[in-house]
Amino acid sequence: MVLTVICMTAFGNFIYVADQTLPVGDANPYAGVYYGYKPLDAIITVYDMGALLDFNVSPNYTQGPAQASMLIMWIGATWIVFVVFLNMLIAIMTNTYSDVYANATANGL
């Protein structure tokens, strides 16, 4: 859970900074408007995009000034999260299997 929050905060920071570089008065920010507090809205946007696969937050992702950097950052974020969580799952399953295997004769398995 802590690792998820760290990943969402790290990539939410990128969206927050990209939002700050938009021209004044741009009607389509990168971060969605959820609570009105931009750093929190950026983290929730990362959750929407990464976990819920909701990419209709802003048209700036497909036609905005930072379209290429947003795509590269999204690919990097999903790759890092995928690799980290898959490695965590493998480690958890390996540890559980080794514990069961070590106690197999004691438990009569």
Image (cartoon, helix red, strand yellow):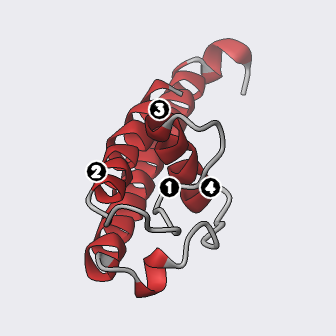
Q: Nearer the viewer, mark 4 or mark 1?
A: 1
Q: What element does badge 3 sit on?
A: helix
Q: Nearer the viewer, mark 4 or mark 3?
A: 4
Q: Residue at x 42, y 62 (%)?
A: 78
Judging depth in this view, the residue of 92 and 106 nearest the camera is 92
On the rendered image, what quadrant is the C terminus found in? top right
Q: Nearer the viewer, mark 3 or mark 1?
A: 1
Q: CA distance from mark 4 to mark 1?
A: 10 Å
Judge left or right: residue 24 versus residue 103.
left
Of the two numbered discs 3 and 2 on the same chain, state the one appearing first in sequence: 3
Could you say where residue 93 lies in the image, as x and y percent from the top left?
54, 38
- The single residue placed furthest to the top in the displayed view is 106
Q: Would you say residue 91 is visible in this rendering?
A: no
Q: Residue at x 44, y 57 (%)?
A: 82
**Residue marked by disc 1:** 31
Judging depth in this view, the residue of 7 and 38 nearest the camera is 38
Q: What element does badge 2 sit on?
A: helix
Mark 1 crowdedness (10 Å alpha carbons): few <14, some 14-19, many ≥20? many
Q: CA distance from mark 3 to mark 1?
A: 17 Å
**Residue marked by disc 3:** 5
Could you say where residue 74 lies in the image, as x and y percent from the top left?
39, 67
